[in-house]
Image (cartoon, rainbow, N blue to C red):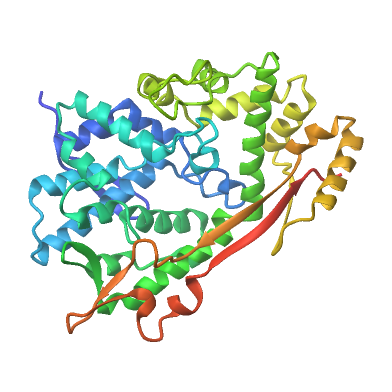
Amino acid sequence: MAQSSRKIINDPVYGFITLDHPVLLSIVAHPWYQRLRRINQMAFAHLVYPGAVHTRLHHSLGAYHLMCSAVSELQRKGFAIDEEEALGVKIAILLHDIGHGPFSHALENVLIRGVHHETLSLEIMKVLNKDLDGQLTLGIDIFTGAYPKRFLHQLVSGQLDMDRMDYLTRDSFFTGVSEGVIGYDRILKMLTVRDGELMVEEKAIYSIEKFLVARRLMYWQVYLHKTVVSAEKMLVRILERARQLVMLGADVPACSPVLDFFLQHPQAPATDTSAGPAGWDVNANLDKFCLLDDFDVMSTIKVWMFHSDMVLSLLSRSLIDRRLLKVRFQATNFDEEYVQEVRKTVAAKLDIPIEETRYLVFTGEAVNTTYNSLDEKINILFRDGSVKDISEVDNALIRQTLTSTVKKFYICYLNT
């Protein structure tokens, strides 16, 4: 019996999502894509918002659904997008996050130093393209920006891409944070193209401002919530401590051989030259990477709760039991003398060397820029044919408040 070329998925945010091409079904059925089911979209946000347990697969399918709507709207307005291009841009958005590792951005550049998820996504796409006899070539060109119709790439990666459109909508839905709700349907209706560039019609100005305000509020209320920051930084310190112990020759068993591999070999080569004993070839080890997920990490941390190293076991048990490091934010950097005093207090309480307290007392900064016009712009197409950046529109809220960078400094510390 021939395989059906159409599948309907019931999504809690948008309703029914339709996959209507054999190559799309082949992508979704692939084990490397199915791995996204086992990676939380929002890492540890569920420690604050218990409903935030949706996955990268949910987000990927949601972004694909919005892309279908965007393409249909642009085609309806008469812009030239043939069926091959429509399929290509849908493939690009469906696979845009396939290179994310466990806990997504929380462990970006930690498990694999020197390699970002966009690079891994592209390498995975290339392997899948070979498996699917070159059917992903156009999608890859759109993903990388190599395809001449720039607006197609902007739909995948830009200020108003379907990635951002979905994660704001989906994350606000699953967290219950209504400040993140955006008028995605109206923005999609107002999309247009001018000189090959993606723009929005004048009638969408207020919807765009709402979209940018929602991003700002979601970052500080959800993504950079102090409890989320604490949990994510604790996760990083746990892996750093485990790696340090491995380098010292200690036995630090992981729950899976693939996680063991990345603990032993954190550094991918930055060039074509030999990377030395700690390096490894990205392409040759994609199969290992594509077996990694949140379950490997959390199961291993549960094992490390019982490790003989006090720092590793304390951090691991604290994360599992949600007894997190305390966090304090302020507008200026923390005085180094104050940080050292806190470390001395922790060292005395736990009877450990003060250098080991760097895993339990540390500082950092959280930065967010809602809209940077020096980066890719959001252009507004007016009825008279003129084009303005959203920050240049008369009485624009964006120009007044949202173009500046907001930086907050934090200290995470063991409560003594």
Left or right side of 57 for 403: right
* One can see residue 315 in this view: yes
**Residue at the location (69% across, 41% down)?**
322
Relative to 392, residue 76 above or below: above
Q: Quadrant of residue 242?
A: top right
**Residue at the location (35% across, 52% down)?**
163
Q: From the image, which quarter does the N terminus lie in?
A: top left
Residue 138 picture location, percent across and down: 16, 41
Relative to 168, residue 230 above or below: above
**Residue at the location (67% across, 39% down)?**
234
Residue in the foreground of this view, choosing between 374 and 229: 374
**Residue at the location (63% across, 36% down)?**
235
Residue 180 picture location, percent across and down: 47, 64
Residue 131 picture location, percent across and down: 21, 24
- Residue at the extreme front of the image, as rendered: 273
Relative to 167, residue 135 above or below: above
Relative to 320, residue 255 above or below: above
Count how many numbered circles sit on residues in the image: 0
Residue 113 picture location, percent across and down: 51, 32
* One can see residue 178 in this view: no
Residue in the foreground of this view, choosing between 401 and 106: 401
Q: From the image, which quarter does the C terminus lie in?
A: top right
Residue in the foreground of this view, choosing between 152 and 187: 152
Left or right side of 34 for 371: right
Q: Quadrant of residue 190?
A: bottom left
Residue in the foreground of this view, choosing between 61 and 378: 378
Left or right side of 260 for 358: right
